[in-house]
Amino acid sequence: MDFKIIKQNKNALFDREDITFKATGTGATPTRQETSDLIAAKIGHKAETIAIISIDSEFGKDSIRGLAHVYKSKEELERKEPKYIVKRNTPKPKKETEAAPAPVAEAKPEEKPAEEKKEEPKAEVSAEEQEGGNQ
């Protein structure tokens, strides 16, 4: 993936940097976490101080454009950005993804007894047919 920073403005009013970026050869649209990691590597900041405001894929092309705000500290980001932006840019905990496969595994054993019950009535029907055929 080719990642470029198109525009980097210092916003003195909010004490942050506004960054416009473009990435080509992305395939699927990258997550906000992946994008903030790329920006952090380019400009030398921590990824936790970067808020991705928007990521837009260009129709018919394998590229994206976006806007990010870079703050000096995580506390400033949380204080100055709307709560929904902070929530979007917070990495999801991995504990939830590990817990999800467990209920799926439990559901499979419940289905097996139902299949065994279906086999028993078939055996009874075949015994009745044999009696009826002998008369």
Image (cartoon, rainbow, N blue to C red):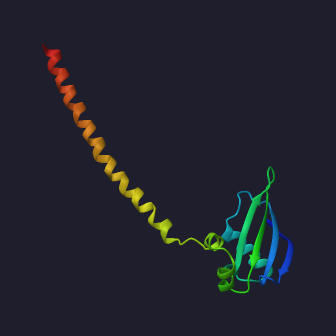
Going 47% across and 67% down the picture, which residue do you hit?
98
Q: In this view, does 87 lie to the left or right of 11?
A: left
Residue lying farthest top? 135
Going 73% across and 65% down the picture, which residue do you hit?
54
Going 27% across and 37% down the picture, which residue do you hit?
118
Q: Quadrant of the C terminus?
A: top left
Q: In this view, does 122 lie to the left or right of 103?
A: left
Which one is nearer the viewer's eye here, 32 or 103? 32
Where residue 125 sits: x, y (%)? 21, 27
Where residue 126 sits: x, y (%)? 22, 26
Which one is nearer the viewer's eye here, 19 or 121? 19
Going 14% across and 20% down the picture, which residue do you hit?
131
Q: Quadrant of residue 53?
A: bottom right
Q: Is residue 31 left or right of residue 102?
A: right
Residue lying farthest left? 135
Q: Quadrant of the N terminus?
A: bottom right
Residue 12 visible in this rendered orientation of the protein: yes
**Rendered position, 45 above or below 102:** below
Q: Quadrant of residue 92?
A: bottom right
Residue 3 visible in this rendered orientation of the protein: no
Where residue 60 sits: x, y (%)? 80, 49
Residue lying farthest front? 13
**Rendered position, 114 above or below 78:** above
